[in-house]
Amino acid sequence: MMSAIEKLQELLFELTGVSAEDSLPLFAGVSMVDLGNTQTYIPMGSVSRKVAYIQSGIIRAYTVKANGDDATLFIRNEGQFIASHDSIIFNQPSRFTYHALAPTTLLEIDYDVLEEIFKSHPVYEPLRNFFLMKMLGETLTHIETFVTRSPEERYRTLVTTQSDLVNRVPDKYLASMLGITPVSLSRIRKRMHQK
């Protein structure tokens, strides 16, 4: 079975043509972080310049609205990257809390260390572009679905693209991410099963 580092080296090779052996400087600064169920990874208000690859587990990014309700921005799981958009792109405190919804293992590197590696090894530059474009693309796709699709269509897309999350994440968080109540989510599921 391929390790998480090997998967990342394979991704790097696809993006840049850099071999696993030649990519060793990039992975020298990587550390493993284990989070317990519901443990916070990045607290709201902190500046976290960390970029992490989710080896196993689930991370939810959320904020608390003025009325005290949680609002889930997104949920990430195995094979995806996680970072505070605010801290990485704008060097500002995170507007969201990032916490584990299950025991989670991350491969983490400091983005400032990456910056130095990119300067001394320009061949890795496509990796930075890939990461930033992926963050931007995921955000734009999420916004687009809220503007152009109904809650039921958003749920169907979630079931199609990330079916494993539907069974692993509590309904209240899925509903929040979809912009609906848990009761509405239950109704949508009932209608889908009746069809």
Image (tube, grey):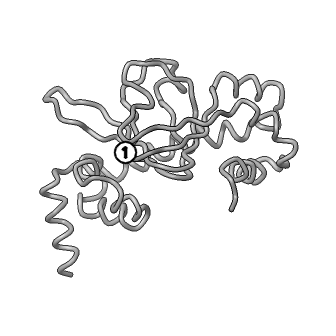
Q: Position of residue 19 (x, y in %)?
A: 85, 49
Q: Position of residue 119 (x, y in %)?
A: 79, 24
Residue drawn at x 12%, y 56% as measured from the top left:
183
Q: Is residue 144 left or right of residue 2?
A: left
Q: Position of residue 23 (x, y in %)?
A: 81, 41
Position of 183 relative to 191 (above/below): above
The answer to which quarter of the image holds residue 22 is top right
Residue drawn at x 44%, y 43% as measured from the top left:
139
Query: What type is the residue that disc 1 sits on?
Result: Leu
Q: Is residue 100 left or right of residue 49?
A: left
The residue carrying mark 1 is 101
In the foreground, 40 or 47: 40
Q: Is residue 62 left or right of residue 35?
A: left
Quadrant including the C terminus = bottom left
Q: Position of residue 67 (x, y in %)?
A: 13, 29
In the foreground, 67 or 147: 67
